[in-house]
Image (tube, grey):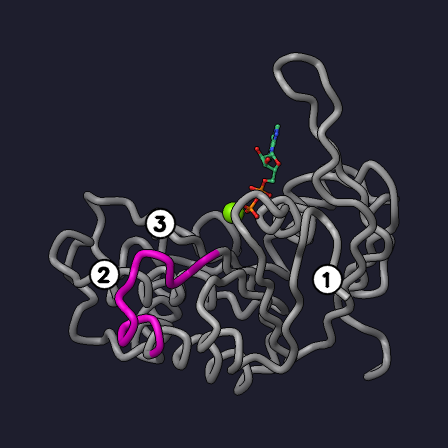
Amino acid sequence: MPDVPFLELRDAVRSFRTTTGQELPVLRGVSLTVHSGTSHAVLGRSGSGKSTLMALLGLLDQLDAGTYRVNGQDVHSLRDRDLSAFRGEFFGFVYQRFFLMPHLTALQNVELALVHASRAGRRQRRQSALEALDRLGLADRAHHRPAQLSGGEQQRTAIARALALVPRVVLADEPTGALDEKTAEDTVSWLLSLCREQDIALVVVTHDPQVAARMDATHHLVEGQWAP
Ligand SMILES: Nc1ncnc2c1ncn2[C@@H]1O[C@H](COP(=O)(O)OP(=O)(O)O)[C@@H](O)[C@H]1O
Ligand SMILES: [Mg+2]
């Protein structure tokens, strides 16, 4: 089994219609193979299609053409219900804006994700959430609300939320875009080491060459295609 990639995107094509009705080709034949436990950086100018690619990888959008296999299964053959099950079981998401609920504590934010995605009872959820925060060095921040956390701590809380269910892959779209350079580096270190430890694959969109250099592979998108 180790030779079967966890994600296998082949010749992905995705277009959108502009408001004037024109067809806007955003991804024009993109392939990406991601094995368990490997890390990938996706670089490219604004508008090059990075977020569109991430949405496809995370089963939040569908290809116009091409194929996509997740865990060996062609996602085209999955129904909506199976798609959401796959998304919940296999994927963790991290975004530039942390998307934490402002009125909930760090702990409650992580627990909330577990309510939606697991059948574990309340006590077990709390335990898993605390462990996830602890792994991100946030044990003593568990009862702080987002406004009482620094930007880096907020993003680490969001990472704890993404990792709490131990996904097979984390998709991070500009996770350090709102952080200063030093905090960005720390945050990526947490993300990278926790993913490696648990054999979780990682795909990170970034503008930061230092962040990209730390991944196993880097890929440059130029107008919807990989740069040669
Ligand atoms: N849902 C959509 N409808 C129409 N156009 C879209 C949609 N999503 C993205 N686009 C367009 O696709 C292009 C690439 O967007 P995106 O993937 O967000 O780029 P990036 O993340 O690299 O900045 C942009 O021109 C954007 O306006
Ligand atoms: Mg984007």
Alpha carbon of mark 3 to alpha carbon of mark 2: how far?
10 Å
Q: Which mark is residue 151?
A: 2
Q: Residue at x 62, y 47 (%)?
A: 48
Q: Quadrant of the N terminus?
A: bottom right
- Determine whether 28 is above or below 150 in the image: above
Along the viewing direction, whichever of 172 and 146 lies nearer the viewer: 172
Q: Which residue is mark 1?
A: 227
Q: Residues within 10 Å of mark 3 (few under 14, many from 20)?
A: some
Does label 2 or label 1 sit earlier along the sequence?
Answer: 2
Q: Residues within 10 Å of mark 1 (few under 14, many from 20)?
A: few
Q: Position of residue 219 (x, y in %)?
A: 66, 67
Q: Which residue is mark 3?
A: 97
Q: Position of residue 208 (x, y in %)?
A: 44, 68
Q: Amino acid at mark 1?
A: Ala
Q: Is residue 176 magenta?
A: yes
* First to last magenta residue range: 174-185
Alpha carbon of mark 3 to alpha carbon of mark 1: how far?
28 Å
Cβ at disc 3 under 8 Å from ligand 2: no
Q: Amino acid at mark 2?
A: Gly
Tell which quarter ligand 1 is in: top right
Does label 3 or label 2 sit earlier along the sequence?
Answer: 3
Alpha carbon of mark 2 to alpha carbon of mark 1: how far?
33 Å
Q: Residue at x 16, y 54 (%)?
A: 145
Cβ at disc 2 under 8 Å from ligand 2: no
- Determine whether 199 is above or below 98 in the image: below
CB under 8 Å between discs 3 and 2: no
Does label 3 or label 1 sit earlier along the sequence?
Answer: 3
